[in-house]
Amino acid sequence: MTERSPHRDDDTQSADNPSATATVAEAEPRSTEPVTGLHEHSRPLSTYLFQRTRVRLISLLALPMTWLVGIYIVSLVLLLVTAFWVVNPFTSRVTPGFTLDNFVSIFTVPAYLSTSLRTLGMALAVTALSILFAVPLGIYMAKLASPMMRNLLAVAITLPLWAGYLVKILAMRLVFTENGFINWALGPLGVESPGFNVWIAIVTLTYLWFPYMALPVFTAIRQIPNSLFDASADMGARSFGTIFRVVIPLIVPAIIAGSVFTFSLSLGDYLAARFTGGATQMIGSIIASNINLNPPVAAAFSMVPIAFVVMYLMVARRTGSLERM
């Protein structure tokens, strides 16, 4: 008895029905090969990256790390290295070397030390004023103001960010100059402009960096449930009690986030003191005056704001505020 082969059946069927064979021969390549080739050619890069984790990671971080390490960190390292170099007293040329005299001069030269402490005090004052203005304004905008008033105030807060830096400095000069707005509007009442001094420089810096404090504080207060305000009122707390015992503890991370900007930007500024501070000197003033005369001293002084910011962040970290940001 002979076993019947399946191939033979196929051959028999093909021979019996030649049109079916042609149909199958035409249908097979259309159903497999063209679809597979289209899938491979439609996403070649995504498939390649999906199969190679390291290549995908390198392609994601190549440009950011080039910017961060190659430009930002390397420039800071070069700045730190320059702070240890010396200036030849005969040729006035900067020569590589190693000396701590540039850093020692920050503490031994009275003008340098007083300028550093004055800049630190001004940065703290700007931060305190920004907090003082931002908290009540944020409460009003988040809980009391109508939507239209909230939008108008939001535009007013961010309006200084729309203009250039020198434009804002010029605006403050026009307010406090001898023939400016203060003397024009309040002169008939016997009020005169204080002129340009350290206090006007603080006001100018507060005007410049206030949006960086107001916006995170407003966002944090808006996220506080209204039930907490009602509960505080039901327990007999007054308005100021609610602010200091309920609102302030909940928005400390936002205040820390905003103060990092107001504090660090005030430390590094010098144009505000130059154009609105009168004879006020800041760290930036000494850096600018020594860029060409004594670059190592300028580089050493550039480390002072960085050291202040690092100490500020360490203090904030000890309070636990950074973990809640």
Image (cartoon, rainbow, N blue to C red):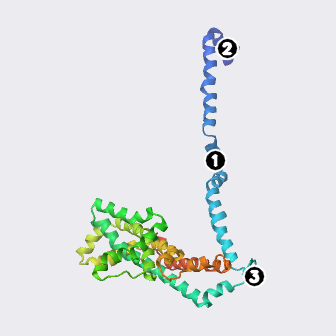
Q: Do the residues labelled 2 and 1 touch (CB within 8 Å)?
A: no
Seen at 61% across and 78% down, the residue is: 289
Disc 1 target residue: 49
Q: What residue type is labelled 3?
A: Asn
Badge nearest the viewer, 2 or 1:
1
Give how far across and how far down residue 58 sits, in percent: 65, 55
Q: Which kind of residue does numbered mark 1 sit on?
A: Leu
Instruction: Give the mark nearest the N terminus, 2 or 1.
Output: 2
At 64% from the left and 76% from the top, the residue drawn is 291
Q: Which residue lies furthest to the top in this view?
A: 16
Give whichever of 97, 187 is nearer the camera.
187
Q: Percent position (x, y) of residue 297?
A: 65, 81
Residue for badge 2: 11
Report the Cα–Cα distance between label 1 and label 3: 55 Å
Front of the two marks 2 and 3: 3
- The local secondary structure at tag 2 comes to helix
Say which amino acid is labelled 2: Asp
Mark 2–mark 1 Cα distance, whole angstroms, equals 46 Å
Instruction: Residue 70: name its quadrant.
Output: bottom right
For disc 1, the neighbor class at 10 Å (few under 14, some 14 to 19, many from 20) is some
Please indicate whether residue 142 sits to the left or right of residue 111 in the image. Answer: left
